[in-house]
Amino acid sequence: MRLRRVLATLILIFAVSLSSLCSAAALHYGDRGDEVKEIQSYLIAQNLLHVAADGVYGTETVNAIKDFQSALGLEVDGVCGNMTYRILRAAAFDEIDITTFKLGDYVPEYELEISGVEIDTPSTSTTTVGSVLSAISTVKDVIQYAGVGDVIKMGMQGEGVIDLQNKLIEHGFYDGEVDGICDADTVDALKDFQRSRGLAADGICGRRTYLAFDGNSYEEGNSYTNGFPNYSRVVRVEATAYSSMEPGMSAYTATGTLCRYGVIATDPSFIPLGTKVYIPGYGYAIAEDTGGAIVGNKIDVAFDTIGECYEFGRQWIDLYIIED
């Protein structure tokens, strides 16, 4: 009898300990510390978090994690659990291609060694944010390499940056050295170019910026123009992105049309369904969808692929309401 009690007590202690370990492995709203700062640094590198890595798991960090989870088809709860952390960290160290990643794809779990720098897996890691960032700095040329046609942002290096700098020179926006390093001068020149083409001046060279280099910008009907629409008013909105390719998403909008590029979800009391709008850097769109989280001045912008959703992220934009 005593043996049974001892075994029951040990099982209870083990269960409580396991529960504590599991809860400690996940980072939530309100958490603080180096672990939070670490994931914030990864989110900033992915252009999902636009505040300093202060080690405080606040609203901005929750929203950035949700954006990441939504783009990857994970459960969108704003909590950085084991799977979210593994994928986010693998993306930061360029172990997976985040633009083509799908749930079920391989995510490294073993100890990784790059250029002689050993990095522990999340499950056994005692690595502080300082050593992680030091490792990132050591392998900077690996984790920030940009090929021709890749999405390019501050700090990246490679043939893609050389191509970008040459394009900026051809269009008269850059007079610096073609060194393949996306530094502040390159980003400033890129922003000037984006403004000149009516794009969102975010300093990130993505698909629509590449189109603009060829003299094109997206317009309704998949045609392209350099013009700017007539509009009746401009509203400031918080925009997120979604796609019918995301797990659990319907192929149809709330109005029964296909969910596709050129559709936005709105709060009908703020922007009525059927309203035609123009979004700089995206093009013309029609309000044909709604969403439970789309309330007031929030909109959801439809894309054809999850990768495009990830690139768009969450941002404040000027929405141009088009005259009838």
Image (cartoon, rainbow, N blue to C red):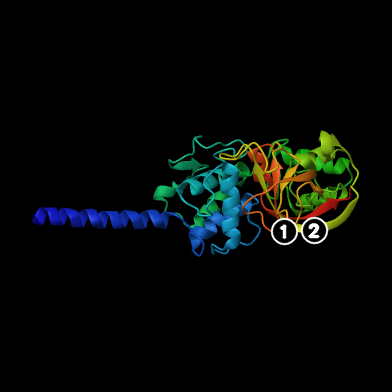
Residue 124 relative to residue 232: left or right: left
Residue 10 relative to residue 129: left or right: left
Contact (CB < 8 A) between labels 2 and 1?
yes
Q: Residues within 10 Å of mark 1 (few under 14, many from 20)?
A: some
**Which residue, given by chain and number where applicable, does mark 1 sit on?**
297
Residue 139 seen from this side: no
The N terminus - image quarter: bottom left
Residue 70 point in image, percent of width and height: 58, 46
Say what amino acid the circle numbered 2 marks: Val
**Which residue, given by chain and number where applicable, does mark 2 sit on?**
235
Quadrant for residue 23, please give it: bottom left
Q: Residue at x 61, y 35 (%)?
A: 100
Residue 266 point in image, percent of width and height: 71, 51
Residue 168 point in image, percent of width and height: 84, 43
Residue 47 seen from this side: yes
Relative to 307, does residue 188 appear above or below in the rendering? below
In three-dimensional space, the C-alpha distance between marks 2 and 1, rounded to whole angstroms, equals 8 Å
Residue 5 relative to residue 133: left or right: left
Say what amino acid the circle numbered 1 marks: Asn
Relative to 278, does residue 211 appear above or below in the rendering? above
Name the disc covering residue 276, or none: none
Kindly state the secondary structure of the residue where label 1 is placed. loop
The mark that comes first in sequence, 2 or 1, is 2
